[in-house]
Image (cartoon, rainbow, N blue to C red):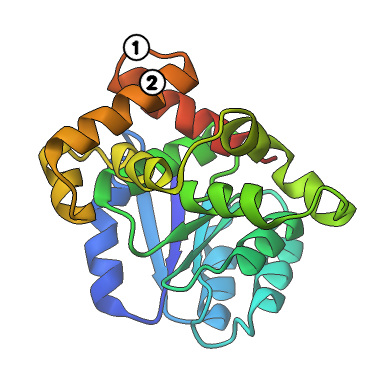
Amino acid sequence: MMILLADDHKLLRDCLRPLLGRVEAQVTVIEASDLAGAVAAAEAAGHLDLALLDLRMPGMDGLTGLMAFMERFPATRVVLLSAFGDLDTVLAAIKAGAAGFIPKTIGGQGFVNALRLIMSGEVYVPGQTLLEAGEHLSPAAEGDRGAVAAAEPVVRDRAFTPREGLVMDLLVEGMPNKEIARRLHLHEATVKACLRSIYRKMGVLNRTQAVKAILSRAGNLN
């Protein structure tokens, strides 16, 4: 599997490289620090399975760079990485054809899980984005409803609370209850209660089934 990692921060690339090696058994990672370098690296590679592009690295110009890269390499699944992921930007990226939008605040296991989902043919967006999409987009907003239609079973039909949405994000990252409680400044008993509610609403019995369901539903955005 050939992966392009393009980000203008070398420290981040160094940190992500070992995680990329966990996506599949045989992974080759090539790097770039700007869009021009990413294009050159992709052309030199010949075949590219996955490209991770930093939304704000030099040359990107917002989603313009994303669309230019995808047009040049239509067979490659392209994912945006960003420390900034407002709802409009995430949805616009997915509608433009990105295979995923991964926030840089995600944990290591969550990052690996997201990429595995993407390589299975699905589309990944953060759980919090699904929550915001269900809360803020009008049913009459026809152009946006196509991008978030799959969010509705998670957010509207099942009526997850904002707190449950945050717990689900950390659950996908593989965090134990104690760490989730620390991150969200909650009592561990509160986290356990949230998980029971999440399991009930999803119709699952345990953490493993819940994580699979969360990733599957996020991937259904395509």
Q: Where is residue 36 in the image (x, y as percent from the top left)?
A: 57, 82
The quarter in which the N terminus is drawn is top left
Task: Judge by depth and name the residue closer to the eye, 192 or 74.
Answer: 192
Task: Judge by depth and name the residue closer to the eye, 108 or 41.
Answer: 108
The residue tagged 1 is 205
Amino acid type indicated by mark 1? Leu
Quadrant of residue 95 in the image?
Answer: bottom right
Query: How many callouts does the rendering have?
Result: 2
Question: Which element type, helix, strand or loop, lies under badge 1?
Answer: loop
Q: Position of residue 184 (x, y in %)?
A: 23, 53
Task: Judge by depth and name the residue closer to the eye, 190 or 17.
Answer: 190
Of callouts 2 and 1, the N-terminal one: 2
In the rendered image, the vertical position of residue 138 relative to residue 22, given as above or below: below
Residue depicted at 61% across the width and 62% down the height? 90
Question: Is the Cβ of the residue at disc 2 closer than 8 Å to that at disc 1?
Answer: yes
In the rendered image, the vertical position of residue 54 relative to residue 103, given as above or below: below
Residue depicted at 27% across the width and 43% down the height? 109
Q: Is residue 7 left or right of residue 48?
A: left
Amino acid type indicated by mark 2? Tyr
Q: Residues within 10 Å of mark 1 (few under 14, many from 20)?
A: few
Q: Is residue 141 visible?
A: yes
The residue tagged 2 is 199
